[in-house]
Amino acid sequence: MILARLDQADRYAALHPAFATAFTWLRDTDLAALPIGRVDLGGGVAAIVTDAPGRGPQQSKLEVHRQTIDIQFCVTGDDLIGWRPAADLRLRATDYDPAADVELFYDEVLSWQPLPAGCLAILWPEDGHAPLASPEGTALLKVVVKVPVG
């Protein structure tokens, strides 16, 4: 898991060929004006714009993706993301859904990380993460850029 401000994201562009595209799009787009839903960025990269409210740490399950890397960016509101290594997850809440590329777990979060507006989290398949854990009802506008692993 990498946490950074968007204005410092370019230092991580060399970690994946599609990261530069994702960071540029996040910087150059009026994200608050986008409709809720999916935006195709090309090359298998897509952004998902959501305005889901915080659900609190107790209601946030850990999730794992196998096919994509998440770049979660808070446009407005401050999120809280739980983290635990995917290799340590044992208490499966759902089976893996390849169409949605997600598997959920009930395991206890090892660490909580604030994700303030203007900041991003890069979450690899090795990172079990519990997003939207800010206090219940917290207004959040987030963009999650899905980058194919390979």
Image (cartoon, rainbow, N blue to C red):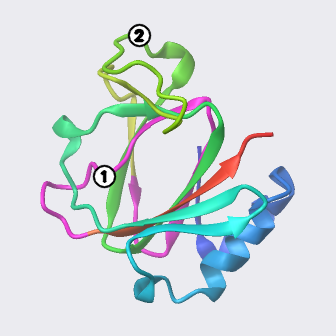
Q: Residue furthest top?
A: 90
Q: How dense is the environment of label 2, judged by Cα within 10 Å: few (below 14), some, or many (20 and up)?
A: few
Percent from the top left, x then y, of residue 96? 47, 22
Asked whether residue 136 is drawn in magenta, I would say yes
Tell me how far mark 2 sits from mark 1, CA to CA.
Answer: 21 Å
Residue at 76% x, 61% y is 19
Asked whether residue 104 is drawn in magenta, I would say no
Q: Quadrant of residue 62 in the image?
A: top left
Label 2 is placed on what type of residue? Arg
Percent from the top left, x then y, of residue 9? 69, 68
Q: Secondary structure at mark 2?
A: loop
Q: Between residues 84 and 46, which one lies in front from this camera angle?
A: 46
Q: Between residues 85 and 35, which one lies in front from this camera angle?
A: 35
**Residue range corresponding to the magenta coloring:** 114-139
Q: Is residue 106 left or right of residue 63?
A: left
Q: Residue furthest front?
A: 99
User: Considering only order in the chain, which callout, 1 or 2, is on the residue closer to the N terminus?
Assistant: 2
Q: Is residue 98 left or right of residue 106?
A: right
Percent from the top left, x then y, of residue 29? 59, 86
Q: Which residue is mark 1?
A: 132
Q: Which residue is mark 2?
A: 90
Q: Between residues 1 and 46, which one lies in front from this camera angle?
A: 46
